[in-house]
Image (spheres, grey):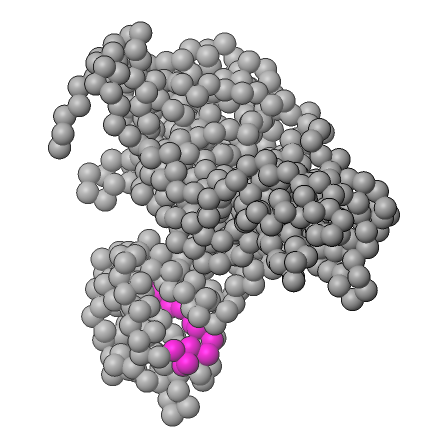
Amino acid sequence: MLRTHTNNQLTQADKGNKVTLCGWVHRRRDHGGVIFIDIRDRYGLTQIVTDPQNFVEAHNHANEARPEFVIKITGTVRLRPEGQSNPNMPTGEIEVLIEEFEILNRAKTPPFEIDHELNVNEELRLKYRYLDLRRDRLKTNIVQRHKMVKMMRDILDEQNFIEVETPILIKGTPEGSREYLVPSRLYPGTFFVLPQSPQQLKQLLMVAGFDRYFQIARCFRDEDLRGDRQPEFTQLDMEMSFINYEDITGIIEDMLIKLSEKLVPEKKIQQSPFPRITWQEAMESYGSDKPDIRFEMKIVDVSDIAEKCNFSVFTNAIKSGGVVKCLKVDGGLELTRKEIDDLTELAKIHGAKGLAYIQLAEEGPKSTLVKHFSEEEIKAFIERSKAKTGDILFFGADSFEIACNSLGQVRLACADRFKLRDKNTLAYLWVYDFPLFEKDPTSGQLAAAHHPFTSPKDDQMDILNSATPEKTIAKAYDIVLNGYEIGGGSIRIHDQQLQKKIFSLLNISDEDAERRFGHMLEAFTYGAPPHGGIALGLERLIMIYQDEPNIREVMAFPKDSKAKDLMLGAPSVMPTETIEELSLEIKQK
């Protein structure tokens, strides 16, 4: 080894020992001829100091060193002078007197400072990601991610799970997000795809008898990005046989509690066991299928009150089969007109036509809406929402989904405005009983809300076979943390006839089912056990633990918000001969 110690190891106990250290110049300070350098590696910092009288050559080399030079030094450990120790550093009580100094590699001046956590343009950070990763913030995130994955593996190993790697090049079976295609050179005109998830492969492992499987799986989705999405990401993928919902949630809950207590002990789990609500309850009360329950602020239904009023926006919504919802914001009278206008625009972004409101002032209710309601109706709104003077009532009148979603977004914005989301609280929540299908409002065509292998609940067969199968409830569940879905799963279909019924409702013909899923259907003829599973998004989980604004900050080499790799310059144009070899033709749009 070139070094005897890393830069976080030396303490008072090493006084008088000769050591060799390697690393980068983090900071350099020249104090009247004596040079102090903080030398850095991924473990930490050590202060080293020159002696220009007794070790002249070493001092002269140190005088050449600049930030980010890679250096190697040999010297003797000594205590820092009285009053100069640094309690914020593990090595803060000692320094190393340099006797030999070697510059291993010189460095250009970095495009941004490494030794300060300054706000740097993200494009610049992504272009020079290898420099960004030298900074404490990202280095800590990557180390925490490593610790989390190791803990997951250890916990699951103790529970008799087996880690199995599944292929990256697989067959395309369109069933959800857009897939990345990989052309086959050996078989012109044919393609592999990169897996959206190992969903079918892990079910086939259940058929194979591996009753407890997991994998730290790389997944790929060619979809529009946002803060908690990337084209490629990692998930903890799991599947189990001969189990029920409680078995899966129990294992995940135990794991998340252990991860939280070990990795972020400063954060408090809001409730254990984790609370559980249905999808219907989540939408009704929070306007989201991934609600943040760190604060109350529940939405209430006021359709029965609103349908009798003289406000056509409310009554027309109800006549059209919609609802009227109400959100009370404590202290909402503090909101300025501009803030209310901004909330209105937010509601419109999420489908609402506007955002009605009533302010509860000392002198009485204030709003352009007041003239449309009787005193009894306004009193009923106040009583239903449990509002008081100083609050504001926001209303959403539309279809169930739009009214709930738009007020759900207003709820989150108001929580941020009044600082109700405590970053040191971990509010885990199970959401279950999701709809099995989504129905296209125009064509009426059903689509799988999760994926086509999700089982309906046992008591839903009459609904599944009725004229309104879209009302069927699935054996599906999500684990939510602080308003983010960090994992989702379901109990799968293992009965061939039920699977055929689901395919039929999804308008997948026998021929199409055989073409897309023939391998699954064939495997199930050899005896498929009852099984189910879940997948946790690693980046989302560590993002929340580390209080980061997006998952790019917990990935070593992410794409930017436009799915481009600014460091490598990808995607890139390929040579003509490569395109021809793959039997492809590029047409410019």
Whether residue 19 is situated above or below residue 51 in the rendered picture: above
- The magenta stretch is 323-335
In magenta segment, residue 332 = yes
Q: Taking 525 as reference, is 430 above or below it?
A: below
> Is 416 situated left or right of 172 in this image?
right
| Image point (46%, 44%), residue name | 108
As drawn, 422 above or below 176 = below
Q: Is residue 443 one of those drawn in magenta?
A: no
Residue visible at 42% across and 16% down in the picture: 520
Q: Of 509 and 115, which appears nearest the observer?
A: 115
Across and down, in percent, residue 480 comes to 52, 48
The quadrant in which the N terminus is found is top right
Looking at the rendering, which quadrant does residue 496 occupy?
Answer: top left
Can residue 254 be seen here? The reply is no
Q: Residue at x 33, y 33 (%)?
A: 570
Q: Is residue 316 visible?
A: yes
Provide residue 366's location: percent of width, then percent of height: 32, 85
Residue 271 occupies quadrant: bottom right
Q: Which residue is at 59% across, 35% downward?
A: 104
Single out the residue that lies furthest toward the bottom: 363
Q: How many marks?
A: 0
Q: Position of residue 442 (x, y in %)?
A: 19, 42
Quarter of the image that includes the C terminus: top left
Instruction: Locate residue 216, reporting x and y percent.
Output: 55, 29
Given residues 354 and 260, the one toward you in this image is 260
